[in-house]
Image (cartoon, rainbow, N blue to C red):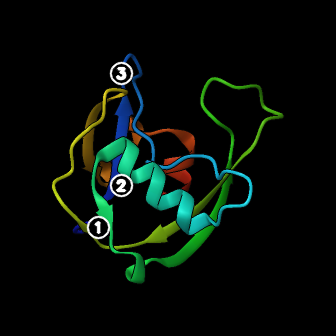
Amino acid sequence: MREGKLLSARSKNKELFYIPGGKREEGKSDEQALVREIKEKILVDLVTNSIRYAETFRAQPDGKNSETIVKLTCYFTDFQGKLLPDAEIEEIDFIGYQNKSLCSLGSIKVMD
């Protein structure tokens, strides 16, 4: 978060922003997955000793049936480097609550 706004990414050919992250690989911790996914998607290095758990949310993923639920385990952390999108990401921005309509259901749930 920066100035009360949530770091968000929008994939190419998609309309909605989402919280950058991804799936945890078997045998890896949430923190290891977070470091890997953020490096892959927005090309910054997380300061690993600053990673702290925020909260876990559950929401329906966009474009999926109502029975599918994703779990978002969220963390606060500092980073080093300049936020840059990888080849899959069209845009990175800090989105505030007043613009939550630009975001996925999961991101909106985190903002609420």
Does the rendering let one see residue 112? no
Question: For residue 89, what is the image quadrant?
Answer: top left
Q: Residues within 10 Å of mark 1 (few under 14, many from 20)?
A: few
Instruction: Give the number of the mark in front: 3 or 2.
Output: 3
Q: Residues within 10 Å of mark 2 (few under 14, many from 20)?
A: some
| 39 lies left or right of 83 | right
Does the rendering let one see residue 102? yes
Q: Are marks 3 and 1 in contact (CB under 8 Å)?
A: no
Q: Residue furthest left?
A: 82
Say if 25 sits above or below 80 in the image. above
Nearest the camera: 35 or 106? 35
Estimate the x, y position of residue 67 in percent, counting from the top left.
83, 34
Say if 8 sits above or below 75 in the image. above
Instruction: Give the number of the mark in front: 1 or 2.
Output: 1
| 101 lies left or right of 2 | right
Q: Classify mark 3: helix, strand or loop.
A: loop
| CA distance separating discs 3 and 2 | 23 Å
Q: Amino acid at mark 2?
A: Tyr
Numbered mark located on residue 12 in the image: 3
Question: For residue 102, what is the image quadrant?
Answer: top left
Q: Residue furthest right?
A: 67
Residue sitting at x 73%, y 60%: 27
Q: Classify mark 1: helix, strand or loop.
A: loop
In terms of sequence position, does the residue under pointer 3 or pointer 1 come before the other? 1
* Residue picked out by circle 1: 4
Q: Residue furthest top?
A: 13
Estimate the x, y position of residue 108 in percent, counting from the top left.
50, 49
In terms of sequence position, does the residue under pointer 1 or pointer 2 come before the other? 1
Numbered mark located on residue 97 in the image: 2
Q: Classify mark 2: helix, strand or loop.
A: helix
| CA distance separating discs 1 and 2 | 8 Å
